[in-house]
Amino acid sequence: MNSKKGFELSINMIVVIILGVSLMIVGITMFYDGYNKVVDLRENVDSDTQARLNALMTSGDSLLAIPFTKKEGERGKPTDFDLGINNELGVGSEFITCVDYSGTSADYSGSPLVDPFEDMVDKEWLLISPVAQKQTLLDNEHGFVPIRIMVPKRNLLKGQYVFNIVVKYPISDSINWDAVSVNSICSPNPSFEQYATTQKIYITV
């Protein structure tokens, strides 16, 4: 009798272990697949898009360029944009890309829901690598910034959501970069000036 119970316990334990290992493998696979996709996108702009941005900045003499400013977004999925920066300051400089939420055409006033883009702290919707966000460009050099915005999965009304893109550069060579953060640069900061006009991107859900 005891041996039968022991056998049943052993079988149950084996089943639990197999299920646990299977779930762990699935979770790790999903994590690394998602992580690699985000890193690849955020670190690099593909060659075709770079060529398109170069053409826009060269032919139009533009300081900043975005090939596609309006895109359709899906709940719970990322929407990707690409920014080109053309350094025409006459000297090499650092350029910092700031992305802020501007507003929406969706009417949340008559809804129990709260605009999730406004509700999220620390811009959890923005995925951009520090390497891409702060770039050092030589005079007349072009830089490329891949920007990924995660569309919230829940509590999102249909409408168009607008984001501002502002690029800044330091007005002094004596900036202590170890003492400043991107948030402090993107906030009003007398040590940095805005480069070119504010760009807008739009996501329709």
Image: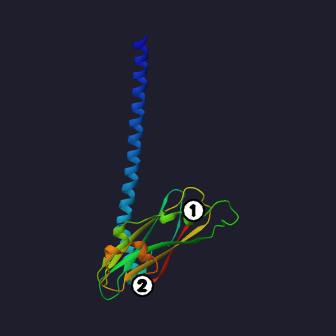
User: Going from the N terminus, do you reach mark 2 or mark 1 first?
Assistant: 1
Disc 2: CA contacts within 10 A as few (<14), some (14-19) or many (>=20): few
Horizontal side of 44 relative to 12 (left or right) equals: left
Give the quadrant of the N terminus: top left
Foreground residue among 154 and 202: 154
Foreground residue among 198 and 16: 16
Q: Residue at x 38, y 64 (%)?
A: 42
Q: Name above or below for residue 122 compared with residue 98.
A: above
Q: Secondary structure at mark 1?
A: helix
**Image position, residue 90 (x, y; %):** 31, 89
Quarter residue 115 falls in? bottom right
Colouring method of the image? rainbow
Q: Residue at x 39, y 13 (%)?
A: 3
Q: Amino acid at mark 1?
A: Pro
**Image position, residue 38 (x, y; %):** 39, 59
Any mark on residue 116, and which? 1
Q: Is residue 45 visible?
A: no
**Image position, residue 23 (x, y; %):** 42, 39
Q: Which residue is mark 2?
A: 190
Q: Secondary structure at mark 2?
A: loop
Could you give the CA–CA distance between mark 2 and mark 1, rounded to whole angstroms? 31 Å
Q: Residue at x 36, y 86 (%)?
A: 171
Quarter residue 157 falls in? bottom right
Q: Name above or below for residue 74 compared with residue 3.
A: below
Q: Name above or below for residue 148 compared with residue 23.
A: below
Q: Amino acid at mark 2?
A: Pro
Foreground residue among 119 and 15: 119
Foreground residue among 161 and 169: 169
Q: Residue at x 33, y 69 (%)?
A: 131
Any mark on residue 67, and which? none
